[in-house]
Amino acid sequence: MSTELEQSTEAGRWRAFRDAITERPTLNLAYRIGVAVVGAAVLVLGVLAIPYPGPGWAIVFAGLGILATEFSWAREALGWLRAKYRQGMAWYSSRGLVMRVSAAVLTGLLVVATLWLLGTFGMIGGWIGVESKWLHSPLTW
């Protein structure tokens, strides 16, 4: 485990690194653009992953966290989203079993419908030798 002193030393090194970049405007612009591109890519990936089982929201928070290292609007958005997420999860957790099961079933149906529309079932069916018209997305007919 890192001690408080080690953490402050690491933070100091990071601050010195960042200050050195800030002193060079072209490098600073390139760094900020790089952070924006990486953060936006992670954020978009997270938003796409939200309806699927797995860490969709964690990826969204990671993307905003990356953006928040350089952009104040992202820090504010991250704080706002955290608060809303906590409120939503508290509301969801306070509902009865029927509501929670219904939400899980609807989420499952959304995942299946999305995978079907994207042609995933037809593609996998082709891999294993199962060809059926209904497996293919109506978007690819």
Image (spheres, rainbow, N blue to C red):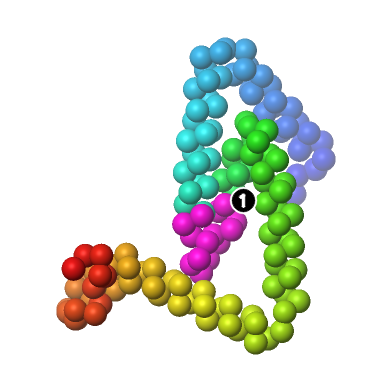
Identify the element where label 1 is drawn: helix
Q: Which residue is at the front of the view, 70 or 110?
A: 110
Report x, y in % for residue 95. Answer: 72, 79
Q: Which residues are magenta?
A: 47-60
- The residue lying at 64 percent from left, 23 percent from top is 18
- Measured from the top left, where is residue 96 in percent x and y? 71, 84
- Residue 34: image location, x then y, percent: 49, 30
Image check: 118 left or right of 17? left
Position of 107 compared to 93: left or right? left
**Residue 70 point in image, percent of width and height:** 62, 31
Q: Quadrant of residue 21?
A: top right
User: Which residue occupies 60% across, 84% down?
Assistant: 101
Determine which quarter of the picture holds residue 88: bottom right
Q: Residue furthest right?
A: 4
Count of numbered badges drawn on the protein: 1
Q: Is residue 50 magenta?
A: yes
Q: Residue at x 26, y 70 (%)?
A: 137
Q: Which residue is mark 1?
A: 61
| Residue 124 visible here | no
Identity, as a three-letter code, of the amino acid under mark 1: Phe
Give the vertical position of 114 relative to 37 (above or below): below
In the rendered image, the vertical position of residue 63 relative to residue 118, given as above or below:
above
Q: Residue at image x 47%, y 52%?
A: 45
Quarter of the image with the C terminus is bottom left
Q: Is residue 128 magenta?
A: no
In this orientation, does residue 98 appear? yes
Asked if 108 appears above or below 73 in the picture, the reply is below
> Residue lying furthest top in this view?
24
Mark 1 nearby-residue class (10 Å; few <14, some 14–19, many ≥20): many
